[in-house]
Amino acid sequence: MRTEQLTRIFLAKLAGTPVFDPNGDRVGKIRDAIASLRHDTLAPRILGFIVEVPQRRKIFIPITRVTSIDDGGVYITGSLNIRRYQQRHGEIQLLAELLDHSTRLHESGQNVIIEDIGMELGDNRDWYAKYIHVLKRARGFRRGTSVTVNWGEVELETPVHGINFANTQEDINQLPAQDVAAALHELDVNRQTEIARTLDDEKLADVLEEMDDADRVALVTQLEGELVADVLSEMAPDDAADVLREVGSEKAESLLRLMEDDEAQDVRRLMEYEDFSAGGMMTTDPVILATDSTVAEALAAVRQKDLAPASAAQVFVCRAPFETPTGRLVGVVHVQRLLREPPALHLGLVADQETNAISPDTPLNDVVRHLANYNLIAAPVVDENERLLGAVTVDDVLDHLLPANWRSTDREA
């Protein structure tokens, strides 16, 4: 029988405690707690636990999956993600990095040794590492006095973890682009350049999209033109156009000459529009099909794994040609409608002819109002002859609404 839920727990004592799934079966044991660092003396928030499962694999279990912690064990809900835990930017392993660490108390400057870390359940139902149990070392004596103090009373030089770039190239290429961009932000541009050269073109393209404008410009300026051209070719044309706008017209033109003609043509077309207009924000490769294409073919097209969710939400039905700028835009079919129709039905019969299209010169604020008024995830952009030029998606609009340094601000927060 489980005892009452504990609200204050010391982690060194919790280490080794068995972890049980909803069926009461033992799945592993606690090895450490992961916390999110702050840039002040406030107690870090507990994100979850490192749990050792069979074959000595260490996995991560979010604190939100923990239903109860008591003297008998830690009880969790949901299924286990058996992927091996890898430390991310801004995280700290409390026991591995702080236990037995020598430091000082802020107020008195007295030398202490960290013996344990206590986490406590807050009023908002989040857990925080609020307490540190330390051993005060008296000068000339091996023994001292143990005392529990608040987190902010101890001088801690907690490292802000990025990615271990000593890993193999394949490991780095498997990491989320957001994490790689955040880790690169902490390095000087020369080191950034060294690491960028080890990444696959596709991964580097994703990383550039996640970097702050200033970091991105500095890195692109350092890299070889041929490499940057290859990476730009891996990007969506609207993202590539954004990068080229930032590096200056002379550098942009030299890079465009190194790109494949058809890819460069799409980017050049986008760069003709104002950055904060529908034409400047749109993607030139939405899902486009003919009127005689079937519902089954449309569903197969939106299932492509590399397609962004906002772009996969609808299919644009056009007359030939089917590369932008297309023939006349006939209509739009949303995925929800596709799921309700027979697979063999032609799109011309199910397309909504009310396309809610906008012109490429539509300014950002009008695009926002248009998407909100019609509850759209994406809006087609057409020329004066109703030819489809591209589509503006919600994520394109959000990226332009946020301040230029929103990524670094988010990391600091």
Image (spheres, rainbow, N blue to C red):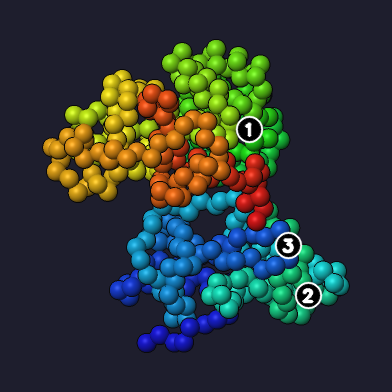
| Mark 2, residue position | 136
Along the horizontal axis of the image, is 333 left or right of 259?
left
Q: In the structure shown, which secondary structural element does the residue marked by tag 2 occupy?
A: strand
Asked whether residue 331 appears in the rendered view, the answer is yes
Q: Amino acid at mark 1?
A: Arg
- Disc 2 to disc 3, how far (Cα)? 24 Å
| Mark 3, residue position | 40
| Mark 1, residue position | 216
Q: Which residue is located at x 28 percent, y 38 percent?
A: 353
Q: Which residue is located at x 47 percent, y 63 percent?
A: 62
- Disc 1 to disc 2, how far (Cα)? 48 Å
Q: Residues within 10 Å of mark 3 (few under 14, many from 20)?
A: few
Q: In the structure shown, which secondary structural element does the residue marked by tag 3 occupy?
A: loop
The residue nearer to you, when weighing 286 against 93, is: 286
Asked whether residue 197 appears in the rendered view, the answer is no
- Disc 3 to disc 1, how far (Cα)? 28 Å
Q: In the structure shown, which secondary structural element does the residue marked by tag 1 occupy?
A: helix
Along the horizontal axis of the image, is 242 left or right of 1?
right
* The C terminus, quarter of image: bottom right
First in sequence: mark 3 vs mark 1: 3
The residue nearer to you, when weighing 362 against 221, is: 362
* The N terminus, quarter of image: bottom left
Q: Toward which corner of the image does residue 192 lie, by quadrant?
A: top right
The residue nearer to you, when weighing 63 against 158, is: 63
Residue 94, how many percent across, how many down?
61, 63
Q: Amino acid at mark 2?
A: Lys
Q: Nearer the viewer, mark 2 or mark 3?
A: 3
Along the horizontal axis of the image, is 243 left or right of 248?
left
Q: Nearer the viewer, mark 1 or mark 2?
A: 1
First in sequence: mark 2 vs mark 3: 3
Q: Which residue is located at x 32 percent, y 40 percent?
A: 354
Q: Are marks 3 and 1 in contact (CB under 8 Å)?
A: no
